Amino acid sequence: MGHDFERIRITAPAVPAQNGTAVLFDSTKHVAGGLSMAGASRLRLSFPGLNQPSAAGGLIGYSSADKGVTWNKFKFGGTVLPATVAAATADDFSAYDIFIGTEEDVKFELTIGTVPTVWTPVIVVKIGDDHAGA
Protein backbone atom coordinates (compact mmCIF):
# COMPACT_ATOMS: atom_id res chain seq x y z
CA MET A 1 0.00 0.00 0.00
CA GLY A 2 1.49 3.35 -1.02
CA HIS A 3 1.49 6.63 0.79
CA ASP A 4 0.64 9.00 -2.01
CA PHE A 5 0.80 12.62 -1.00
CA GLU A 6 1.99 15.96 -2.21
CA ARG A 7 3.48 18.90 -0.36
CA ILE A 8 2.52 22.46 -1.21
CA ARG A 9 4.64 25.31 0.08
CA ILE A 10 2.76 28.51 0.90
CA THR A 11 4.49 31.87 0.48
CA ALA A 12 5.23 33.43 3.87
CA PRO A 13 3.55 36.72 4.71
CA ALA A 14 5.49 39.94 5.21
CA VAL A 15 7.20 40.36 8.55
CA PRO A 16 4.73 41.90 11.01
CA ALA A 17 5.32 45.29 12.62
CA GLN A 18 6.31 45.71 16.28
CA ASN A 19 3.72 43.84 18.40
CA GLY A 20 1.99 42.88 15.14
CA THR A 21 0.32 39.72 13.91
CA ALA A 22 0.95 37.83 10.68
CA VAL A 23 -1.56 35.36 9.25
CA LEU A 24 0.71 32.44 8.34
CA PHE A 25 -1.99 30.28 6.79
CA ASP A 26 -5.71 30.71 6.12
CA SER A 27 -7.31 27.80 4.27
CA THR A 28 -10.16 30.02 3.03
CA LYS A 29 -7.56 32.00 1.09
CA HIS A 30 -4.88 29.37 0.35
CA VAL A 31 -6.92 26.23 -0.49
CA ALA A 32 -9.62 26.41 -3.15
CA GLY A 33 -12.74 24.51 -2.13
CA GLY A 34 -11.69 23.98 1.50
CA LEU A 35 -9.41 21.52 3.24
CA SER A 36 -11.54 18.40 2.79
CA MET A 37 -12.06 19.08 -0.93
CA ALA A 38 -8.29 19.38 -1.37
CA GLY A 39 -7.58 16.38 0.84
CA ALA A 40 -5.31 18.38 3.15
CA SER A 41 -4.10 16.36 6.12
CA ARG A 42 -1.25 18.22 7.84
CA LEU A 43 0.30 21.66 8.12
CA ARG A 44 3.93 22.19 8.99
CA LEU A 45 5.06 25.57 10.28
CA SER A 46 8.76 26.12 10.92
CA PHE A 47 10.82 29.15 11.75
CA PRO A 48 14.46 28.68 10.66
CA GLY A 49 16.74 31.56 11.58
CA LEU A 50 14.07 33.47 13.52
CA ASN A 51 16.18 35.77 15.69
CA GLN A 52 13.42 37.03 18.03
CA PRO A 53 10.88 34.91 19.92
CA SER A 54 7.17 35.39 19.35
CA ALA A 55 5.00 37.09 21.91
CA ALA A 56 4.00 34.79 24.78
CA GLY A 57 1.49 32.32 23.31
CA GLY A 58 1.94 34.10 19.98
CA LEU A 59 1.25 31.13 17.69
CA ILE A 60 -2.51 30.64 17.67
CA GLY A 61 -4.63 28.20 15.67
CA TYR A 62 -8.27 28.58 14.70
CA SER A 63 -10.91 26.31 13.22
CA SER A 64 -14.01 27.33 11.26
CA ALA A 65 -17.05 25.31 10.23
CA ASP A 66 -18.58 28.18 8.21
CA LYS A 67 -15.92 29.02 5.62
CA GLY A 68 -14.13 31.53 7.85
CA VAL A 69 -17.13 33.63 8.89
CA THR A 70 -16.48 32.58 12.50
CA TRP A 71 -13.05 31.51 13.76
CA ASN A 72 -12.71 29.57 17.03
CA LYS A 73 -9.38 29.09 18.84
CA PHE A 74 -8.38 25.44 18.68
CA LYS A 75 -5.51 23.40 20.21
CA PHE A 76 -5.29 20.88 17.31
CA GLY A 77 -5.04 17.52 19.03
CA GLY A 78 -1.58 16.60 20.24
CA THR A 79 -0.14 20.00 19.33
CA VAL A 80 -0.69 22.43 22.15
CA LEU A 81 -1.61 25.84 20.84
CA PRO A 82 -1.25 28.63 21.61
CA ALA A 83 2.53 28.32 21.74
CA THR A 84 5.45 30.66 22.18
CA VAL A 85 7.81 30.31 19.21
CA ALA A 86 11.38 30.41 20.46
CA ALA A 87 14.14 32.27 18.70
CA ALA A 88 16.29 29.94 16.60
CA THR A 89 19.71 28.88 17.82
CA ALA A 90 22.77 27.89 15.82
CA ASP A 91 21.65 24.25 16.13
CA ASP A 92 17.85 24.28 16.10
CA PHE A 93 14.63 26.14 15.33
CA SER A 94 10.96 25.81 16.25
CA ALA A 95 8.71 23.63 14.07
CA TYR A 96 5.10 22.52 14.42
CA ASP A 97 3.55 19.56 12.59
CA ILE A 98 -0.22 19.99 12.95
CA PHE A 99 -2.94 17.52 11.97
CA ILE A 100 -5.70 19.46 10.16
CA GLY A 101 -7.41 16.59 8.34
CA THR A 102 -10.66 16.69 10.33
CA GLU A 103 -11.30 20.43 10.05
CA GLU A 104 -13.38 22.31 7.46
CA ASP A 105 -11.09 25.37 7.52
CA VAL A 106 -8.13 26.49 9.63
CA LYS A 107 -6.13 29.64 10.21
CA PHE A 108 -2.82 30.15 12.01
CA GLU A 109 -1.48 33.49 13.22
CA LEU A 110 1.79 34.55 14.81
CA THR A 111 2.10 37.64 16.99
CA ILE A 112 5.56 38.98 17.58
CA GLY A 113 6.90 41.46 20.13
CA THR A 114 10.21 42.66 18.73
CA VAL A 115 10.45 42.75 14.94
CA PRO A 116 12.83 40.00 13.80
CA THR A 117 15.55 40.84 11.31
CA VAL A 118 15.47 37.23 10.07
CA TRP A 119 11.97 36.26 8.90
CA THR A 120 11.83 33.11 6.79
CA PRO A 121 8.88 31.03 8.04
CA VAL A 122 8.31 27.83 6.08
CA ILE A 123 4.66 26.90 5.60
CA VAL A 124 3.89 23.54 3.99
CA VAL A 125 0.51 21.84 3.49
CA LYS A 126 0.47 18.08 3.05
CA ILE A 127 -2.22 16.91 0.63
CA GLY A 128 -3.15 13.24 0.52
CA ASP A 129 -2.80 10.02 2.45
CA ASP A 130 -1.81 10.38 6.10
CA HIS A 131 -2.41 7.15 7.99
CA ALA A 132 0.04 7.97 10.78
CA GLY A 133 -2.18 10.70 12.27
CA ALA A 134 0.83 12.00 14.20
Image (cartoon, rainbow, N blue to C red):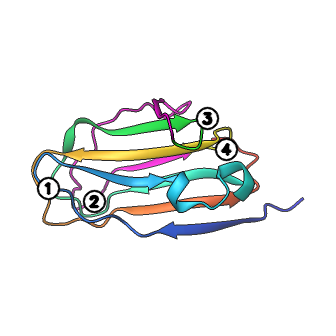
Mark-to-mark CA distance, 1 and 3: 30 Å
Q: Residue 70: within the magenta? A: yes
> Depth-wise, is mark 4 or mark 2 nearer the camera?
4
Local packing at callout 1 (Cα closer than 10 Å; few below 14, some 14-19, many 20+) is some
Disc 3 designates what residue?
A: 65
Q: CA distance from mark 4 to mark 1?
A: 32 Å
Q: Which mark is residue 17?
A: 1
Q: Residue at 47% of width from left, 34% of height from top?
A: 71
Q: Which residue is mark 2?
A: 91
Gap in Å between the C-alphas at discs 2 and 3? 39 Å
| Direction from residue 40 to residue 50 in the image, left or right | left
Left or right: 121 as drawn, with respect to 97: left
- Image quadrant where residue 56 sits: top left
Residue type highlighted by circle 2: Asp
Q: Residue 94 location, x and y as percent?
A: 34, 50
What amino acid does circle 1 point to?
A: Ala
